[in-house]
Every structure is written in structure tokens, then in C-alpha cells.
Amino acid sequence: MALCGRLARRAPAFTKQLRPAAPSIASRTFTSRASRPLLSLRTGHESQASYRQLRAFSKLPANWNQTQEAPNAQAYLNSGVIAGARDLVDVKKVLVIGSGGLSIGQAGEFDYSGSQALKALKEAGVRSVLINPNIATIQTSHVLADEIYYLPVTPEYVEYVIQKEKPDGIFLSFGGQTALNLGVNMNKKGIFEKYGVKVLGTPVKVLETSEDRDLFARALEEINIPIAKSIAVSSIDEALDAAEKVGYPIIVRAAYALGGLGSGFANNAEELRDLSARSLTLSPQILVEKSLKGWKEAEYEVVRDASDNCITVCNMENFDPLGVHTGDSIVVSPSQTFSDEEYHMLRSASIKIVRHLGVVGECNVQYALQPDGLDYRVIEVNARLSRSSALASKATGYPLAYTAAKIGLGHTLPELPNAVTKTTTANFEPSLDYVVTKMPRWDLSKFQNVKRDIGSSMKSVGEVMAIGRTFEESFQKACRQVDPKFLGFQGDKFEDLDDTLRNPTDRRWLAVGQAMYHEGYSVDKIHDLTKIDKWFLYKLENIVDCTHELEEIGSLFGLKKEVILKAKKMGFSDKQIAKAVNSTEDEVRARRKSFGIRPWVKKIDTLAAEFPADTNYLYTTYNASSHDVTFDDHGILVLGSGVYRIGSSVEFDWCAVNATMSLNKLGKKTVMINYNPETYSTDFDVADKLYFEELSYERVMDIYELETASGVVVSVGGQLPQNIALKLQESGKAKVLGTDPHDIDKAEDRHKFSSILDSIGVDQPAWKELTSFEDAQKFATSAGYPVLVRPSYVLSGAAMTVIRSENELKEKLLAASEVSPDYPVVITKFIDGAEEIDCDAVASNGNLLVHAVSEHIEAAGVHSGDATLVLPPVHLDQSIKDRVKVIAEKVAKAWNITGPFNMQIIKEAVEGSEPNLKVIECNLRASRSFPFVSKVLGTNFIDVATKALVGREVPEPVDLMKVERNYVATKVPQFSWTRLAGADPYLGVEMSSTGEMACFGKDLVEAYWTSAQSAMNFRLPIPGEGLLFGGETSSEALVQIAKYIHPLGYKFFAVNNGIKDLLENSAEGISVEVIEFPKEDKRALREVFEKYDIRGVFNLAQFRASSLIDEDYVMRRNAVDFGVPLFMEPKTAVLFAQCMSEKLPKKDGIPTEVRPWSDFIGGRPL
């Protein structure tokens, strides 16, 4: 066990550090001790003697423990060794830069780390000002920050906030790459110096060194640390020259880019030419380096304070070899396949690097390690909180972000108590007696034309973290957490299995499963194809062997106690066992319980049980024989939202956290179940108990029974908890709080939903469920095209589509999906050009308590998650708002709702009479717009809902829509098109955005102006630059846009005469130049964009492109690839043009939209 050795080696240093004798010295020797021998080993100068000496001293702790009593942090601090913090930084008010909307590569982990930083500031009594337009996150609430500005995270707006708030310090390392780039940029311009703002934590110079590839390479050369040989270039020709020197195959990386954006592999000059052309649009400098594909990849999280105390908190190993971005890799912590020597070699190197660079706070070092030798290369250093640091915090229970913030304020590690274990100082290295597996979640199937391969540029939208006592247990849990449709480690059908194993895609682990389960591949063969370490493959083979053993038994009654226990120890779920023996989940569960086989609850114990650790941070395992906790709280279970994916993101985490906080205020004990390491809900101090566990029926019931819980909340975690609600109540006899799951089912089931709406006199669009293509054709003809089709069984492509002709219907229903009595299809009349209204509400026993009515700017047909929401609504008159309220009251009564619910309503104009309102969807749970409406209206909807759920302190009904407000907020989507090579940036009925932002203003123009600019890397086109127009030649919207922005002095371009004529005939003095447009040559196209200085694209097409050489598709896709703002939806494009006409040219002074949130809503209610 490398682990035990490692523990043993750390213990003396650890105990020494707790002795009341000069701790500063102890903590220093602690880090330098191990680093010497190993360093010399690597260089091969010294003898083996020093290494033996290192091994010898690991025998110390055995006799230590006999006499040593458990350390007591309080006694240690009281003993006066630490004379309190001596050199605290003198700051009264600190500006924290947030990361903006969630996107691929920069997601919820920065909500978590930013929140931790704000918490640390609050404890220190320092005022905090946060600038972050992401309204869905926990950090943008006054519980954590003193003032919040919902504004774009750009140098311009941050400078306005600095002028207004006059902070004396700023944190740059808690807002991801966005905040880091902003800080480097503003520092270059001398803005911090000008206003006397101190950069806390890691100095900007260090950030520049770690981000600029050339400086970084030079810095590491100074201390003889090997890095992948690379040459920094800034043009395509230089890149080709560099490749000749380095030698193919090579990898290209972009400097100052996040999540490997703009990087890729090239095997020859042709591939390199295309790749470097694309990368140079995203970054001024790119790096050409030798590819080390096939080496192992490892990461170390390192913390250093200003007094040079330095520790490594966590090391992680990638299951996938180098070549797959770490955000797209399966990651295991602690490392499983490294020898002791390798582990220490990399640990020493990490400390050496971090000290040399001068990082103050938290830092992450990524390595490539030769699979069969001691050679290694440093890949990169992130001198900021990263995705891995959120994972490391959750995997070890060491609060990295919080500690980094404290260090930024001037504290040192030995004087900080460890916030989680409460029995040690922060100056210790955790050691784990469990295995953590992180697995990414991709949603690539939602996009057409998108390339499924994964490589050096990250594509996953979320990640899960599973904890187990064996690798098998942990790995299988992770498989199920990624998507409940997976039962555990399993296979899937592939057209070309060997190719998928050789070239990784998002389904790679399923390919390994297929090869092992069904194709009989040996471990050696799979290793040769994938280069995945054999240790992992042998472990996976254990799972396969166990499955075959179960299949041979073949019946429920053949299952002996030993067999069930063995399977459970390997992480098999009841459902998985049931499938193998042809039984059902409930029968297997009953049999398992009859043998007394239940999971044991363990604490996350970062002292590996050497010393008592006090934490509420729990997981379940079958590899144990006792519980670490008692179960006498009878708390309420709150089910979290699980993995972030498109459609379910940080908004639901906000809901889950707020529900938990409300329950705590009502004096209830709370138990949170969630397994997402990026979230605030899985932080150690949110709920009374936190289970880092699956949200499956089996696991929720296990915990419910162990805790003898007093209820379970299923309405604040999105769709996952809803899906198991009925089963929890019926099979598990659990007490589901709020709306009865039978009623939830009546809203999910199309037929029941429809007949209830009819019975209460609420209108809905005409629809039918049909079982054959002929019937579908008949309905579509009688109702009239366009129609909305939802097949229940989809083979390829998106699930929901608007269909405008009979040919299209044929293609969709006969080619892309199956229509039969087993797989019916639902067809709904689609109302063209209608407006959409969102209604979020809370009811108690069928009575409406509060509700919010927001309007979409886009016409119906754009998914509500991709739409721009306006609240209070600007275009709805009072009579419509009143009618929406009546519908909400009727729905609440009909379904007897207690708790949150949400409706989507279509407003269809009717000539000569008032418009029709038709309900198209109703969810009896919190929706993704709950944080938005709560923060805009200044009323916490989840707090109201929670009180209704437990029936305590339920407030009186109040009509928030009757209150006059002198402001408007708009919520806009954040897309990640840049990441999804090939995907068509076009909006339809399937959701494609990954995050959201919202800004406030005195009117719609002011609010939308800042909201639109909040999108990541958005650069406003400046008058005099070129704008390219495209799309339908019949588009009224294009004419309107041209009229709004023509007076500002932009140059107009088009690629065909139709658009030129349309615009030139629309108004006096507009002239449009038709330019060449090479559709199949990306390089030539890039030169066209540069030649005409095209800095904005308006492309308003009516339909999604059918081919990859469609002119509009090429225009949209390349606008995204070249980092040019793209407006592809008519109504928002016209609105932004209106904003430009009113807001440009910019006036002097601070713009009127730069106001804190508390100023808009009048106070700090949330």
C-alpha cells in the first residue's frame, strides 16, 4: 500500500507541527525534508543512501501513536505559539471578480470558490463588493456579498465599479480564466495603480508568467524542471517553422485560454495550418510543442502562503492517458498506479515550482509522466482556483478556496485552523482512506454536426464525483451518477469498436465495457489500443467477471449472501444485480435486506483514521463494518440536482441550497444528498449532514431508512428527484413533502395533463398522440403545418423538432426515429410568431402564494432556457397579467400544489378580440428561472416554497406583479458554441445554452445593453468597423437593424446581391458591399474577415442549415470560430441594434446602468 507508506511519512511531520515548539520551523522542514533525496535521485548524482534514509524514517510513527494523545486545535492555538496573525494585509473593502455565465470549461466550480472567498472576507470583517452577472449562483446574494453589481466582467465596467466603490483590494483568482485575464489586462493598463487597488494573493506578475508560455518555460528552466519542448508563435508561418524544429506529431495550445480552448493535435503540416489558423483567432499567441500522447497525466494541488509554508493538498491521476483534456478525463484521487518514488518526485517538483514562481494562495500543477520510467514533463500551472481545485476540496475535505482567500488576506497556514476537521491547522496534507472517481458528463447529442471526439479542448458540461472504498465501487457509482440510464460499468453498440478505443470520444468508457463484456478483448489488447494503465483495466475486469458470475447463477433464489455482498462491495446496484439474474430491483433489495446487507456510512476522514476528525461530510460503502455517525436527527432529506448538464445547472443548486437554509432557519435538521463537486450545496457547512451520494431510488431509500428521516424534498433539484418521487412514496413508503407524487405524475403524463386542463377551462394547443406515420400525416394536414413533433424513441438528432412540410415529416418520423404502438409520437399544433410567457409560482394546499410573470423577447419556438426573459414584463398589459394569474390559481387548485411550480404559456394574437393564452407546459417543481425572479422581485420564492412544504410560518398570499417597479431586468443565455466544433449556432426547441446572465437597468434598452455584453469574450463592434449581414432576403428584421445602426458609421457587407438590394432599398444612404465568401476554405475565409475588418455578424435565417456548405451555416459557424459577436435571432438582434443606436457613441462619466443590485431593488432582502 503506497498509501500507508505515504501516511507514515507524513505523520511525524504532522505531529511535530502540533507540538508547541517553533511551529514555523517545523512546518518548513516538513516540506523540504522529502524533497531533497528524491530530487537527487532523479538527477542520479547521490547514492541510494539518502533514499534509504527517507524510507527508514517512515518507521517512526508506530511508537509515536502509543503515547501521543489526539491533537486539540484549540489547546494548540491557546498555547500562544502563534501570536495571532502578524502581517495581515490592511484592506477595508475588497472587490471580488466573478466568472460570469456558466460555459463549457468554466462552470459551477467558480460559484463555489467565489462563495468561499466571500465567506472568508465576511469572517475577517472586510466589506466585499462582487461583480458577476450570473444571477443563478449562490454567491450573488447578500448572504455572502455586501454589494453586488450585475454587470459584464470587462475592464471597462470593472473600472466604473472601482471609481464608484473605491475598494482598496481586489481578488482575481476566484473567477476562473475570465477574472484572471481581466486582471492581467487591467494591470497592463495601470488601472489598479491609478486607483490604489491592491491585488491580493498571487501577484499579477506571477499570473502573467504562468499564462505566458514563453516566460513560463524560462522560469522552469531556471530550476531545472523539464517541460514539454515548445515554441511560442504568433503567425501561421512561424507555427509551421516551429513544427519542423520540434518534430511531428505536435500539439498546439493557445495562451490565456480556458479549458484547452484553441488547442489540438496535428500530425502533418496541412493539419497544423488549419489548426493554427483557428487558434490564432482565439489568442494572440500560440504554442507549438511536441506531443506526449499516451503518457500518464497527473495533477497536484498546492497551497503556499506568503511566509513560504507550502503543502500539496491532493494528487490526482487521469484514467485516460495524455491527449484528453483533464476536464474531459475520468480522474482518480489519490493516484493509484504511481510508485512511491513517482509520487514523491512529482510532489517535490510541485513545491519547488510553486515556491519559485511565488504563488500566494492556491495553485495547480499538471504533469505528463512516462508510463514506464521516471521521466516527466510539466504541462501547465494554473495560478488560480480551477476545476480541479473544486474537485480536490470535495475529495479531501480541505477547503482550498477558503484557505486561499485567508492567505490572500495575509494569514499563514500554521495559524489557520482547518475549517472542516476542526482538530488540525490548515498546514497539513490530507491522506485518504477511500478512492474518489470524477467522471465528466457530455451533452454532445443535443447538437447537430458536432464532432464527438474528445482531445485537448474541453467539451464536457459537467462532472460527477463518487466516493468508495475500492476503485470498482467508486467507478461504478460514477457511471450511474453521470446518467441514471447507465446501471454501472457496461458496454454499448459501436460501429467501429477498435477505432473508438484508439481515438477517444465521449463514449470511450462504454467502448472499453463493450470490448470486455461482449467482444472478449484481453486487458493487453485494450491497453495497446487505449494506453489506459493496465491496473485500471484489471480492476474493470473484476467487475466484468462478477457480472458473468451473477449471470451464471441466473435466478434471484440462487443469490447467496456471499455473492450479493461481493457484488455490493464492487459497487453493483440492486438494479444491476437484478438485470444479471433476471429479477427486479425491489426483489433484489428485499433479498439483500433479508440477509442484513446494508451500506455503512463513513465520514470523509482526511487523517485516514490516524486522529479523530470531526466532519458531517459522509458517503456510504459496503466495504466497512461500522458506521461513523449516529442517526438521531430524523432530519429532512433535500435531494440536489446532480450533475450539471444542458437544461439543469447552477439554478437548481441555488434552489437546493436556499431550501436547506430555510429549513435550518425553521429549526429543522437537514440532510443534503448530491454528488456534484462543483456546487455550493456539497460544501461542508450548508446542511447538517451531507451525503456525497447517488440520487437513485436505491441510495435515497438507504439513507432515508438509516436516518429515519422525517420527510424528503423532491421539488428543488430539477428533474432527477422528480423522476424517483413516485417510487419513493409507493415502493419506499417515504414521506414526500409538498405536492403528492401522483399529482406530479398527472402533470408529466401528456394525457392526464391535457384532460385536467380541459376540465378547468384552460386553453392548450391542439395535440394528439399517434402510433403510425399515416395518422401523424392526417393530424398535421388537418391542424395545418407547422407542427411540433416529439418522438418518444429517438435514434439520432434532437428529440423535438418544428416541422413545416410533409416531406420533412416523412424524413423525421421514418428516418430519424421509430413510430409504432410501442413508441408513440406526440404532435402539437405549432403557433408561428406567438409570444411566450413564463410563470413561476408557489402554492400551499392548492392556494397561490406568490407568482412572477416574465416575458420572452424571442418568439415561441425558442426553448425557454435559451430565451431572453424580461421581468417585470414590458410588453404585457395588466389584463394579460391578470389572466395569467387566474390560470396559475386554477392550476394550483386542480393539482392541489404545495410548493414550487412553473408554467409556460403561449400568447397568440387574434384579430378583433383579446389574445388567446394557451398553456404548453407545467412543471410541479422549481424551474431554472426561480433564482432570477427571486432576485429581481426581491422575494425569495424558494423560502416561501419551503415554508409551504413543511407547513410552518406560511406567508399570506401577495401579488408581486401589482407592485410598480422603476427598473427592468433581462436574463440572457450563455452559449458555448466555440467549444462544440461543427455545431450550428442556431436556436430551436431543444435547449443549447450552458449558462445564463442577467443585468438590471432603468428600462429594457439599458438592461439588455449590459446583459448582451455579459456574454463571455463578447467584444462590442466599434463604429467604423465592418458588419456582415446574411439570412433571409425577406427579413424585415434586417431592414430594421440597418436603419438603427447605419447612422453610427459602420461599414456594411453582404455575401449575395439579395441582401444588398434588401438593405439598400430600405433607407437613404445605406450602401452595402458584396464580398467574396469562400465556403470550404476556413483559412481563406479568415483572411476575408481580416481584410474587411468584420467585427459583427447579423445572420437571420429562417431554418436550421441542412448542409455544411450552406452559406448561412458557414457564416454563423465561422463568426463563432473567429470570436466575432453573432446575432442569429431576429427579435434580440433588433433589440441590440436599438441599444447600439441609443448607447453609442459612448458618453463621458459613469454610465447610468452602473448601480449595485441593492440600489435597484431597494434593500437587501435575499
Image (cartoon, rainbow, N blue to C red):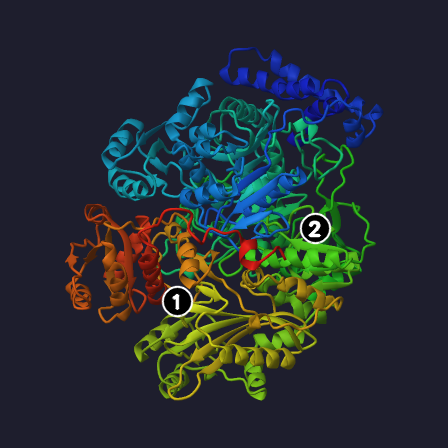
Give coordinates of residue 313: x percent, y percent.
Answer: 61, 33
Q: Which residue is drawn at 50% across and 84% down?
A: 763
Residue 83 visible in the picture:
yes
Q: In this rendering, would 419 be left or right of 538?
A: right
Q: Residue 988 carries which label?
A: 1
Q: Distance between the residues labelled 2 and 1?
A: 38 Å
Name which of mark 2 and mark 1 comes first in the sequence: 2
- Amino acid at dot 2: Leu
Q: Which mark is residue 690?
A: 2
In the rendered image, the quadrant that contains the N terminus is top right
Q: Is residue 762 above or below residue 1070?
A: below
Name the one closer to the observer, 732 or 1134: 1134
In the rendered image, the quadrant that contains the C terminus is bottom right
Name the one closer to the observer, 96 or 863: 96
Give coordinates of residue 422: x percent, y percent.
Answer: 74, 37
Residue 490 visible in the picture:
no
- Amino acid at dot 1: Gly
Per the image, label 2 sits on a secondary structure element best described as strand
Q: Which mark is residue 1136?
A: none
Image-quadrant location for residue 798: bottom left
Give coordinates of residue 751: x percent, y percent.
Answer: 55, 82
Give coordinates of residue 546: x percent, y percent.
Answer: 63, 51
- Crowd tier of the residue under label 2, counting other residues whose Cα lies within 10 Å: few below 14, some 14–19, many 20 or above: many
Q: In this rendering, would 33 be left or right of 1015?
A: right
Q: Is residue 223 above or below residue 888?
A: above
Q: Residue at x 81, y 53 (%)?
A: 631
Per the image, label 1 sits on a secondary structure element best described as loop
